Structure formats: structure tokens, C-alpha cells
Amino acid sequence: AALANRLAGVAPTDADEAFFDANDAALREMREDRAAYEKREAAEASVGKMVWSKSVNDAMAGSSTRSQPRASSTWDDEDRVVRSTRGKRPTRGEGSSDDADKDGAFDPAPKSLFASYLGRYGAGGSFLTPSASKAGRLNSGSTNGVGVLEDSALGRMGASRLRRASAADNPKAYAAVVIMACDRVDYLQRTVASVRAALGKRPGDADKFPVFISQDGRHKATRAFAEGKAKDFHWMQHLEDRPPTTRTRFRWDSVAYYRIAAHYKWAMKTLFDDLGYERVIVLEDDMELSPDFFGYFEAAGKVMDADPSVYTVSSWNDNGQKIHVSDERRLYRSDFFPGLGWMLHKALWRELAPEWPDSYWDDWMRLSDVRRGRESIRPEVCRTFNFGEVGSSKGQFFRAYLREIKPASEPIDWDAQSLAYLDGNAYEDKVRRSLASATMIDSPTQVRLVPPENAATNVYKVIYASERDFNRLAKRFGVFPEWKDGVPRAGYRGVVTFKMYQGRATVMLVPAPSAAVAKTYAQWTGTQGLEEPAQVG
């Protein structure tokens, strides 16, 4: 970490240090996975070629027979046994050999070794390990220094329950909802109960939003719950053909993030490409939904469908702590992709799928070259509450930020809400007017408490000159001190807006002309509809 700091010229934050400490076991886990895979290969070699698990089409048809063997063999980790058929002895992955790197040693002369310093400006490191290339997990190209995950490395369908699960079988469907799960069955139970409750708030939502549980791996308790108490939802199981290989030996580069990226691509490929849905809402197995969750997504989705400058719709506000929010009806445009309960359209999926990364998919979606100036719709008050303190990120931000998030509780009728203010031009004009009339300050002690009737005009702006300056001010005001590829969390054109005093004051952290914020949609596309951000300071 110290070497990376010196070469990158960036001092690690407290969050960076916590992240290092939380991933001490990553390399050991990677070695254990490889050792287990070698044992599997030996078992395969002793009995011959295996039969693959059911395909998507088999699962949809409800067939109980297994599909025909493919050209290469794989461990059937659905049942943790080797299933044999007649055929030649299986071979190792293309290009692999007995002298392949077994410890994940990286290229001694990689390109741009620390170009994406510890994942803060990209998704993981910017180089490939020899073993990762030999395993066929990555192709010869890359995107922003991130390995591209090929379809051949996605894994396969295991057991499933997908009868009448396609968009054609559900003509009233607005969006498929997928709950990404692995082995936290207690969390999954809580999330499923919350989804059921939210679906019951509006008539017809159960038909508009078919729900899928996508299980990564073969955790028995998770499978038992999906097959039993969650049998009113569709279920599909993702099984990997071989353990993923990390591209670095740093502690933060955990194999878990590689598995997550593969699971996400596999699930979305299944829902979009195989089952034919136009939109997909992605949930994780540690989320509780607000009562108006589905109404919110349907209303905001209309904005997304009509406006090419809208990237995704999210239920999440990174600065959604109780002290920073008040208006449950207020929505924002943000350059920062929030994730954590979000929806994308098939058109965006077709754009992203060919270059989907092998790891750290969410940071990859935040890269300027991927986002291309498009903005996400997000609420002031979160429509999901993330209760997962245990997981792949080891709860690194839970105690500091997530635990104090305020979830929405009002039963808002989104069909009756006008969202015309989210139009790109109208929204930018409103931000400009707010900045022009805001009072300049440099400390939270200068924010005045006014009567509720004067709250709309009690607006302040704080100017920052750089990423380091933003992080300093963000910590002072208690908002998220993080910056990804020219975009602060929850930022719009570099402007981060939040509330104080239960909504009686609005504060805007505003970039000075010297702050290197990301390009706008207009700058990416050359369109005339959106102007460049106003110079402030």
C-alpha cells in the first residue's frame, strides 16, 4: 500500500486503509480455490467427460433431462459430484500448462502498473496475471485497464424454476426484478419478505414486476429457501466452471469481486437476452424496500425511456442519512452511478455487455468512458435500506454511512407526481438559478436555522478546488468523501446537494473552475440541448 501511494502520488484515505484490512485473506482464498480446482480436475480425469447442467431453454421448458455434453468438461458443482458419460478425457483450459503460475504472480513489467490506484479511478488494477490469461478468463483487449469478461467464462445454469418466466409469458411486465443472492439466507429471507410487501401496495404490481432470485453457487440453505418458502418467485442458479483468477496480488483484489461480476453479467444476460425483458431492476439480498418502491421505478423509468442522457434509475442516495434529507418526493439527476437497487434498459445492456468487466463492475460503470456523460435518476430519500453489514465488502462503509440512512415511508402516488423538472435542460437551469442565489460559506457553523416557511430560500454554496479539497469539505459537513473518475458521490456536474436541519437549509458543494470534474453528456455527444456547466467560484 505504501509503494502504491508513492507511485500514484495519492495518500490513502481512512476508507482505503479499512478496505486493505478487510481483505487480508483474499490471496489465501484464491490459492485455496485453485487447489480445490486441481482436485476437481483430477476427479474429472479419472472418470471421463461430464454432463453439463440444464440450459436456460431446458429450465423454461421444465425438462427433467440433462442437455447433451459440450466439447469441454466441467465440474458439476450443483451436486458436488462428477457425472460421467462416454467421451475422451477432459483437457485443461486453453493455453494452460503444468508450469502455469500457481500463485497469481503478476507481470514484472505490466502496463500502467498503478494507473487505477487501488481501484479508486477504475475497477481494480490495470494489468493481467499470466495465469488469468491462460485460464481464458480475459480476452486480449481491455477497457480502461479493466479485463473484459468473455461469455465463455460466465459459467452455466444449474438448477432452476423458470416455467412461464419469459417476457412473452408475462405480457403485462414492466420490468423483471432480480434479487442477487449467494449464501446469506437470513438476509435473503428478509429481502424476499420486503419485496412481497412492496408488491402488495398497488394492484397489478405482481404482474408488472416478475421477481427472480438469482443464486450464485450451491449454498444448500439458500437453495432450500428458494425452492420452498420463496416458490412464488422464479429461481435460477449460477454455477461457475472454474474458480476465477484475480489480476493482482494486492489484498484489496478479492476473488469475491470477480465472482460477483460474473454473476451479474450472467443474470442480466439471462433476463435480457434469453428471457426477453425490456428493463431489469437489480436488487441485492440485503435490502428492504420502501412502500412506494415499484411506483417510483415505473414513474422514473418513463423519464429514462424518453431521455437518452439518462443512464439508469436508482433507489439510492449516497448522502441519504437522516440528517441530510427531508423531501420524499424530490428526485435528482446525478453523474454518479449509485447502484444499490437500480434499473437499466435493454438498450444500455446491449451497449455494456460486450465489454462487461471481469471484476468491480460497479466502479467500471462509473468510469467516464463508460458512462459518457449520462446521468442517473436518484431520490433524495432512499427507496431501499441496505442492512447488510456482513458481505464481500466486510461492512466497510456500513457503520460510517449506511446504518444512518433514512428509508422512505410515505405512501406516495407517483402517477400523480409531475417529473417534468427532471428534463435535462430544465434541471440544469434550476441548478444554475440555485447557485446564483446561494450564500457563500466555508463551514457548517455558518448555516443558519430558519423557520420551515423560509427553507426554500435558505441555500448555501461551498466552493472546492480539487478532489482533495472536496474530500476535506465533505468530511467537515458529514457527507460521503469519495470521488470516482471526476465525479463525487451523488454529484451533478460536480455539485453535491444535501440538506441540513431537517430540510430547513440546503447546502451545495460546488466545483471551482480548477476542479477536474467529468465531461457532460453534451460534451460527449456534441448535442446543443445541454450547455457546459457554469463557471462558479
Image (tube, helix red, strand yellow):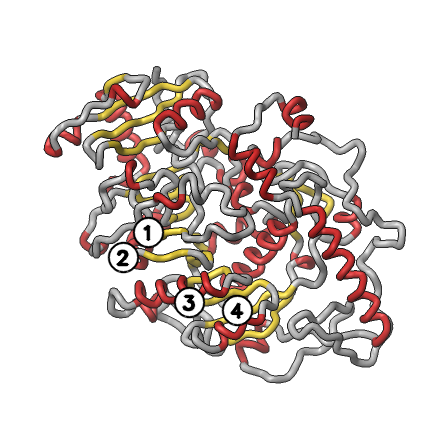
Report which residue position mark 3 lands on.
Answer: 211
How many angstroms separate mark 1 from mark 3 (CA)?
Answer: 17 Å
- In primary-sequence order, the first of circles 4 and 3 is 3
The disc label shown at residue 222, or none:
4
Query: Which residue is found at the position 31% from the left and 59% from the top?
Result: 294
- The quadrant of the rendering that contains the N terminus is top right
Query: Which residue is found at the position 22% from the left and 25% from the top?
Result: 459
- Mark 3: which amino acid? Val
How many angstroms separate mark 1 from mark 4 (CA)?
Answer: 25 Å
Q: Secondary structure at mark 2?
A: loop
Report which residue position mark 2 lands on.
Answer: 292
How many angstroms separate mark 2 from mark 1 (CA)?
Answer: 8 Å
Q: Position of residue 97 (x, y in %)?
A: 87, 54
Report which residue position mark 1 lands on.
Answer: 383
- The quadrant of the rendering that contains the C terminus is top left
Query: Which residue is found at the position 28% from the left and 37% from the top?
Result: 323
Please name which of the two marks, 4 or 3, marks the residue nearer to the observer: 4
Quarter of the view holding residue 414: bottom left
- Mark 1: which amino acid? Arg
- In primary-sequence order, the first of circles 1 and 3 is 3
Q: Are marks 2 and 1 in contact (CB under 8 Å)?
A: yes
